[in-house]
Image (spheres, rainbow, N blue to C red):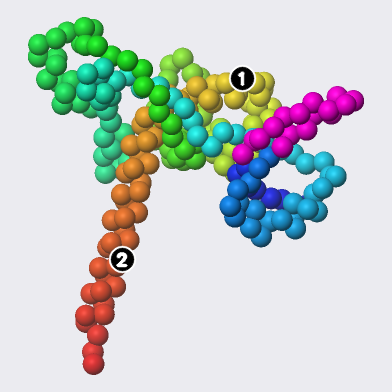
Amino acid sequence: MAYIEFKPLVKKVNLKPDGVQEVVLEVRGGGLAGKIDTLADMIDTHVNVQLEEEFVSYSVVVNKETQKPMTEYKVDDQGVVHEVKPIEQTELDLGLPPELIPTEQKEEVLKRETIDAFIASGLAPTFDDMNLDFYKIMGMHLDGLSYLKIASKLNISDGRLMEDLDEYRKRVAPLAEKWGEWKESQKKVKLDREKNNGNDDEGTGVA
């Protein structure tokens, strides 16, 4: 069975005669490098397609004066994300009740794969008003199961699954951003350690 995965840009959705709907996808750069022949073999064959936006948009509440988030996060050595109060917020609390601090909504975006990795890590929080097991759902999804099949296993509609998952991603996005930064810093520390160990080994060589 032929399989191909790529990240296109949705360009057009056209309604053609006889109820046929045409979807035009555009792939830029080398997004289809080494995959053209496989894709060509799929022409005029029935395929399963699942499209998801690459980035998740979400809102954060910021201090209108400083543009700093009203809620900030830090990550401990185990990768657990904790909520902390910004220094600016602490200072304002001394002379102004929190409810009187001017705030506004600020739109942010984050790669969906970062959020999904955070959910799959098992470190994402749960919410009382959301009773789906998103850790389990993400595990099934990353194992290759389609959302339609996941919904069937959970005995819910795929529409409800996607609606709840989209909401959950938005809620945990601010934490996932900090977690993603922590993961990248851990990789850098590991690479630096390996590099230093390699230099030490070279320095102990016998001529």
Q: Nearer the viewer, residue 99 or 123?
A: 99
Q: Residue at x 31, y 34 (%)?
A: 81
Using a 10 Å C-alpha cutoff, classify the residue at mark 1 as few (fewer than 14 neighbours), some (14 to 19) or many (20 or more): few
* 57 drawn magenta: no
Q: Is residue 26 left or right of residue 22?
A: left
Residue at label 2? 194
The reply to whether residue 68 is visible in this rendering is: yes
The reply to whether residue 126 is visible in this rendering is: no
Q: Is residue 59 left or right of residue 15?
A: left
Outermost left residue: 94
Q: Residue at x 63, y 46 (%)?
A: 27
Q: Nearer the viewer, residue 202 or 61?
A: 61
Quarter of the image with the C terminus is bottom left
Q: Residue at x 31, y 55 (%)?
A: 188
Outermost right residue: 18
Residue 71, position as x, y percentages in the image: 27, 23
The kind of secondary structure the magenta stretch mainly shows is strand
Q: Residue at x 78, y 41 (%)?
A: 47
Type of amino acid under label 1 = Arg
Start and end of the magenta stretch?
9-24
Type of amino acid under label 2 = Glu
Sequence-wise, the earlier of marks 2 and 1 is 1
Residue 205, position as x, y percentages in the image: 24, 85
Which secondary structure lies at badge 2?
helix
Residue 178, position as x, y percentages in the image: 33, 37
Residue at label 1? 160
- Say if mark 2 contacts mark 1, CB within 8 Å: no
Residue 176, position as x, y percentages in the image: 39, 35
Q: Nearer the viewer, residue 53 or 121?
A: 53
Using a 10 Å C-alpha cutoff, classify the residue at mark 2 as few (fewer than 14 neighbours), some (14 to 19) or many (20 or more): few
* 19 drawn magenta: yes
